[in-house]
Amino acid sequence: MKVAASSLRKGAVVDMDGKLYVVLSAENIHPGKGTPVTQLNMRRISDGVKVSERYRTTEQVERAIVDDRDHTFLYQDGEGFHFMNPETYDQLVATPEMVGDAAPYLQEGMTVTLSTHEGAAIAIELPRLATFEVVETEPSVKGQTASSSYKPAILSNGLRTMIPPYIGPGTRIVVLTEDGSYQERAKD
């Protein structure tokens, strides 16, 4: 299915020369003079090689037919990451290369959207927010204002983030899965 290059977004899968690529970022550039272009940063699904392509915004790109379905994350082992389709109970194994930066955010029982092409997982979309426990952080300094200063913390998934000074170890917080930034205290 041919689509305009300017309509592609993050997570879209394109077919170039018989190879599948997942779009990591898409940016439309409108220079003062000349033709507007779309800059696509992509990862080749077969071997994980990252490529950068530039198209005129009106140029047509072949979009691959992919099946996007919700799957439940089960566990990770030497084979890879195991997911289950909650409707058919079919299990699917995704490679660590395909999961990539999303790996630390995966929690047992989490529902994610997996894109599959001919039965193989090719892209993953996490929920926007995830809840983790603060494992380690610096003690708050008396007299520090809560509005302007954040302190570093290590979460239960091993990631580092910046949190407000009034939050201590053992507190569950909600983070944005795009960049791991603190959003709010967990309400549970």
Image: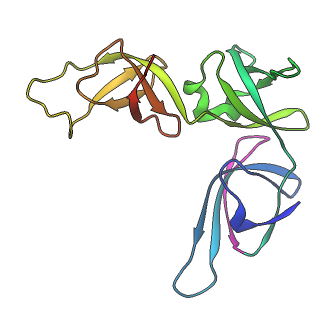
Q: Position of residue 53 (x, y in %)?
A: 68, 63
Residue at the spot 51% in from the left edge and 85% down from the top edge: 32
Most distant residue in the front direction: 187
Q: Quadrant of the C terminus?
A: top left
Provide the major secondary structure of the magenta segment: strand
Highlighted magenta segment, given as a residue range: 43-57
Residue 119 vs 40, above or below: the answer is: above
Q: Is residue 49 magenta?
A: yes
Q: Residue at x 25, y 34 (%)?
A: 150
Residue at left offset 81%, top offset 49% = 20
Quadrant of residue 169 in the image? top left
Give the colour scheme of this rendering.
rainbow
Q: Is residue 1 above or below residue 142?
A: below
Q: Nearer the viewer, residue 143 or 122?
A: 143
Q: Is residue 69 left or right of residue 8?
A: right
Against 119, residue 133 (above or below) is: above
Residue 80 seen from this side: no
| Quadrant of the rendered image containing residue 99 | top right
Q: Residue furthest bottom?
A: 33
The residue at 85%/33% (across/down) is: 120
